[in-house]
């Protein structure tokens, strides 16, 4: 397994992390520096949440500023990485018989992806493809699709989920920038335990956890971690923490790595 490209899930938090330097962005930068250079990156971002499974297939994806209320310099930020129609085709192939549409003009690289890659791979010279999250499918679908992507790691492709395992914007406590509510910490710890010590595939059972409604009021930010869990289950391996923490009470910034060979 050590010759496989690592995979990761990153708790990306606020889009301002693209411009800021903090312990989370430093961990993302360290991750990018220590792994082998990927041939291309497949990102599963919380912010491409649609009623279909699709993959970006354009040669030059645009930088999407999918937010509002932030300073002008964030809207001016560009991450001009090339796309990879070849990786898009490979994703569609390994996902079979799951149907994956080829998006050649509607999406691009959203902030769930570029806010992290701006630190992990700041030169923006590695091709980037995004895989959508199908909002119509249950948790098990995303776990199983993640497992189907495993052959891409053998080809030198980095698979990265980007979301937050706890994400409740309606419960933010601006007076607690570095802390989590009790329920947030309990749920985040349950996710971490399954990924790092238990059965990664059992993460789908957390839908029945009493803290799930608070931690995951909408599934978009939680679903990306299921792709890492699926890859871990397929590899028969546990993940390792990349960085841990909570923000504003109701956000988990936890990030995890599956396999982490030195460059």
Image (cartoon, rainbow, N blue to C red):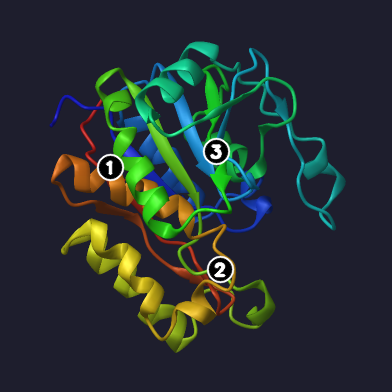
Question: At which x and y percent is residue 13?
Answer: 58, 58
Q: Which mark is residue 53?
A: 3
* 218 is higher (above) or lower (below) than 181: above
Question: At which x and y percent is residue 117?
Answer: 54, 35
Query: In the depicted view, which residue is nearer to us: 178 or 167?
Result: 167
Q: Residue at x 29, y 40 (%)?
A: 147
Say whether disc 3 or disc 2 marks the residue closer to the N-terminus.
3
Query: In the depicted view, which residue is nearer to us: 87 or 188?
Result: 87
> Which image quarter is the C terminus in?
top left
> Which image quarter is the N terminus in?
top left
Q: Judge left or right: residue 16 versus residue 119.
A: right
Q: Residue at x 45, y 45 (%)?
A: 161
* 244 is higher (above) or lower (below) than 124: below
User: Element under label 1?
Assistant: helix
Q: Crowding at label 3, few (<14), some or many (≥20) Cα neighbours within 10 Å?
A: many
Q: Which mark is residue 167?
A: 2
Q: Nearer the viewer, mark 2 or mark 1?
A: 1
User: Element under label 2?
Assistant: loop
Q: Nearer the viewer, mark 1 or mark 3?
A: 3
- Which residue corresponds to mark 1? 231
Q: CA distance from mark 1 to mark 3?
A: 18 Å
Q: Crowding at label 1, few (<14), some or many (≥20) Cα neighbours within 10 Å?
A: many
Query: In the depicted view, which residue is nearer to us: 180 or 146?
Result: 146
Question: At which x and y percent is residue 109?
Answer: 65, 32
Question: At which x and y percent is residue 51?
Answer: 63, 47
Q: Quadrant of residue 174?
A: bottom right
Q: Judge left or right: residue 182 versus residue 204.
A: right
Q: CA distance from mark 2 to mark 1?
A: 22 Å
Q: Judge left or right: residue 213 versus residue 147.
A: right
Q: CA distance from mark 3 to mark 2?
A: 22 Å
Q: Quadrant of residue 53?
A: top right
Q: Crowding at label 2, few (<14), some or many (≥20) Cα neighbours within 10 Å?
A: many
């Amino acid at each position: 397994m050590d010759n496989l490209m690592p995979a990761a899930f990153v708790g990306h938090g606020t889009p301002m992390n693209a411009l800021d330097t903090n312990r989370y962005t430093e961990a993302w930068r360290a991750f990018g520096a220590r792994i082998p250079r990927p041939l291309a990156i497949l990102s599963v971002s919380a912010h491409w949440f649609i009623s279909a499974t699709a993959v970006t297939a354009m040669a030059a994806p645009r930088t999407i500023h999918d937010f509002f209320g932030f300073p002008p310099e964030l809207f001016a930020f560009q991450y001009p990485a090339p796309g990879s129609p070849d990786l898009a085709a490979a994703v569609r192939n390994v996902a079979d018989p799951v149907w994956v549409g080829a998006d050649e003009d509607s999406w691009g690289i959203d902030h769930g992806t570029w806010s992290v890659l701006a630190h992990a791979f700041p030169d923006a010279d590695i091709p980037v493809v995004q895989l959508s999250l199908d909002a119509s499918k249950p948790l098990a679908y995303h776990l199983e699709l993640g497992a189907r992507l495993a052959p891409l790691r053998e080809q030198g492709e980095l698979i990265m989920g980007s979301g937050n395992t706890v994400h409740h914007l309606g419960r933010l406590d601006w007076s607690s920038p570095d802390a989590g509510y009790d329920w947030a910490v309990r749920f985040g710890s349950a996710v971490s335990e399954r990924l790092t010590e238990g059965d990664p595939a059992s993460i789908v059972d957390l839908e029945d956890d009493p803290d799930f409604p608070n931690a995951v009021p909408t599934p978009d930010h939680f679903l990306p971690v299921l792709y890492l869990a699926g890859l871990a289950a397929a590899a028969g391996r546990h993940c390792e923490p990349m960085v841990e923490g909570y923000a504003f009470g109701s956000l988990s910034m936890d990030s995890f790595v599956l396999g982490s060979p030195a460059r």
